[in-house]
Image: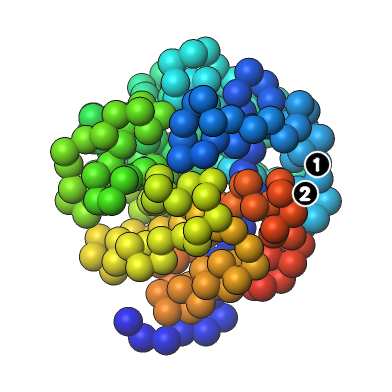
Amino acid sequence: MTETHGQTVTLFPAIDLRRGRCVRLEQGAPDRETVYESDPFRMAETFVGQGAEWIHVVDLDAAFDEGSNRALINELARVTPAKIQTGGGLRSEADLAEVLDGDIGRAVIGTAAIERPELVGTAVTRWGADRIAVGLDARGLRPAVRGWQEETEADLFEVAAALVAQGARTILYTDIARDGMFTGPNIATSLELAERVGADVVISGGVGGMDDIDAVRDAGRRSPRIVGVIVGKAIYEGRVSVADALRRLGG
């Protein structure tokens, strides 16, 4: 890959919702939950005040088939100046309509993208590729589904290529083993995904400090297809400043 300069990588501060509260899970495990904030509206306001233009919101209850926070997320999108990207339990066209027919900027299809890839094609046709992303969350090169509770036998790169063929242009890639562990994001696989399948990649999982933000920025300079990074726990625990991260990423 050639060196490029001036590439802006979007920062997505994360709000993971469980029972209406902002939480973080270690490696996606429901029994390893930390509650950071009871009011997601206050958290979103904080992120916007620090300069965030996008917020990534995960509906963990929907992902675990334990209910839904969609009404709350729609209201969050209505009142928050930042654009909302949301995923978790979006497994049908009706689910997608619940979020995309309102103020939400982008929906992330995870489990359904792997189990029924044709849904991605339908969604792209109906709402446009800019408002649809696919979430590929993997242990090694094996994507996981249903809130990361079930591992598939599929190959990450083959699945990604098939989804790009359905019209997907943006992949949210999470290395599950690194998520919430502060061990650094999986830059190498993110770059390989971008290069091999020709999709824009948003990196998620493992950011533990400002050095990791710099590493993502440098990856964006190497490949213009590295377009974003999702940061959650590192922000809540004071390891990453939203304002400083935005400056470093070029925002």
The residue that label 1 is drawn on is: 45
Quadrant where the image shows the C terminus: bottom right
Question: Badge 1: how crowded within 10 Å, few (<14), some, or many (20+)?
Answer: some
Where does residue 23 sit, x and y in percent of width and height?
64, 32
Exactly how many numbered labels are in the figure?
2
Q: Amino acid at mark 1?
A: Glu
Q: Secondary structure at mark 2?
A: helix
Where does residue 201 sit, x and y in percent of width and height?
41, 58
Which picture quadrant has residue 78? top right
Residue 141, label in figure: none
The residue that label 2 is drawn on is: 48
Where does residue 145 sit, x and y in percent of width and height?
32, 31
Q: CA distance from mark 2 to mark 1?
A: 5 Å
Question: Badge 2: how crowded within 10 Å, few (<14), some, or many (20+)?
Answer: many
Q: Amino acid at mark 2?
A: Val
Which picture quadrant has residue 197? bottom left
Callout 2 touching callout 1 (CB < 8 Å):
yes
Q: Residue at x 75, y 32 (%)?
A: 37
